[in-house]
Amino acid sequence: MTLFKRCDQVAAWRKLLELRDAKSSFNLSSAFADNPYRFEHFSAQAPHVFIDLSKCMWDEEVQSALLDLAEQTHVLDLRDALFRGESVNTTEQRPAMHWLLRAPGAGSNPPLSAHLWGLHKEVLNTREAFLNFAEQVRADPAITDVVNIGIGGSDLGPQMAVKALAEFVTPSKRFHFVSNIDAHEIEGVLSALDPNKTLFLVCSKSFTTIETMTNALTARHWFQAHGGTNIERHFVGLTSNTVLAKEFGIETTFGFWDWVGGRYSVWSSIGLAVAIAIGAQAFNSFLQGAHEMDEHFKTATPRENLPLKLGLLDVWYRNFLHYKSRNIAPYHSALARLPAYWQQLDMESNGKSVDKESQSLSYATSSVLWGEPGTNGQHAFFQMLHQGTDVIPVEFLVVKTPSHNHLKHHELLLANALAQAQAFMVGDNNTNRARYFPGNRPSLFTVLERLTPASLGALIALSEHRTFVAGAVWGINSFDQYGVELGKTLTLNIMKQYANAEFKEMDPSTQGLLLKLRKSST
Ligand code: F6P
């Protein structure tokens, strides 16, 4: 097991505190004036993903101290433990092997251990089975609509990827996503469907999530009530709990393993909607892009290791510059669900307050991630990002080659992204105070050559590893999510009392609201 060292107790942490104080007047424009090669020095190319980190609030000295911090907190040892399949999910005593799901078929490099090799064989068999099924569905003209029922990782990954890869999606089918327990959502989807032309994918690692189970039952009732025949053909289960799927009446199930966290599961059978949408070959490219990023994370030197540098930047921003939030600005409308996807990945993984030895933390962890596609955000919240009192780093993401022929639109889109990033840095020293922009506000700028299955796979794997790196420095377990459990338990408790109005162990506010809602419901 990797040695655990609290980040706030190592020399590099103290050094970073000193650097933060010494560089409190750090200015981005001056940093460029001092170093004409700053762009070259602080930008990096990883597989499929280029990122300019030169407009970030750091310099060579800070970056070196951050790399020391990674060394002193054994981040790369922990990375190696992750890839050896050790139980890095310490509270649940499981490995976290989402990376194994995208390892290619033959000749892994370096070769897998005997134990992992056995698991990988299972992965490949399952992958082959669900990709064959995806191809059958694609070739079946009788199926016109695919409905993915799932929530959290069983929704955000597939939904984000199907939208992002719209250019590659078969035009012969429509894809729908139902996640919310709010029946407005499922009602809106079902009302436009023909049951005998619809395939439901019931997507749930646990097959117990109340939202998904309730929606799946509603879909089944609707299917039967509207003349649907052959449930076996029209409902498929994607789950690691094949027993419960069977009890639900589902015959066709594609499984996966408890060592795949929900938010890391799009690479497994949970990605079936993506595979049906883009086909087996493109799904394999999606896995391949992610695998290339895994290899980069495993083998690139620390100075060239993009996931490592991004995770360390997150630590610098959160713990030393005290930025509480990160804005995600994808300048591509197909990436509209990317901020939501990253929210779960980062905030569910790293929103923790105790370390791996159950000790309280003296430092902050996950920041708040949020965002909207550009240029829409510019006409909504960018005002606050430019002139508000909080400094919020912005993460621009652009795609060099679009999938349309409207060159003028695309040039304007890219010009907008570049101009915004420039404006954050240079500001405007206007004497009219209302028109004054402080500038010196950080951003990073990601460039994909094209938005393809491979580049999307690489981008997602990059963010998974980035989250891992920050969690590793903080000494937390990034792979559990107990913070979601209390609300689930209290919901069930309230549901019981909703029916019989006993109001046991309920605070006056919840009781008062419940009474009000019960009255209005009658
Ligand atoms: O409630 C949080 C969570 O457990 C997520 O981690 C997960 O992605 C989501 O619920 C859905 O869980 P399941 O796939 O088991 O339905």
Image (cartoon, rainbow, N blue to C red):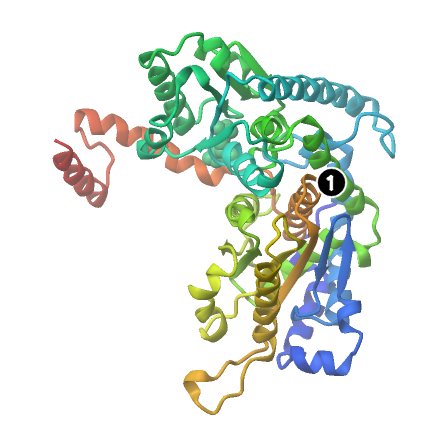
Count of number-bearing discs: 1
Residue situated in front as seen by the camera: 3 or 522: 522
Corner quadrant of residue 489: top left
Residue 334 drawn at (x, y percent): 55, 47
Above or below for 270 versus 359: above
Callout 1 amino acid: Gly
Direction from residue 195 to residue 347 in the image, left or right: right
What SS does tag 1 mark? helix
Q: Residues within 10 Å of mark 1 (few under 14, many from 20)?
A: many
- Quarter of the picture containing the N terminus is top right
What residue do we see at 45% from left, 23% from top? 208
What residue do we see at 59% from left, 22% from top? 138
Residue 318 drawn at (x, y percent): 58, 62
Residue situated in front as seen by the camera: 86 or 399: 399
What residue do we see at 55% from left, 66% from top? 322
Above or below for 338 versus 314: above
Residue situated in front as seen by the camera: 112 or 359: 112
Corner quadrant of residue 28: bottom right
- Res. 319 in view: no
- Quarter of the picture containing the C terminus is top left
Residue 497 drawn at (x, y percent): 22, 28
Above or below for 138 versus 56: above
Direction from residue 377 to residue 317 in the image, left or right: right
**Residue located beneath label 1 in the image:** 289
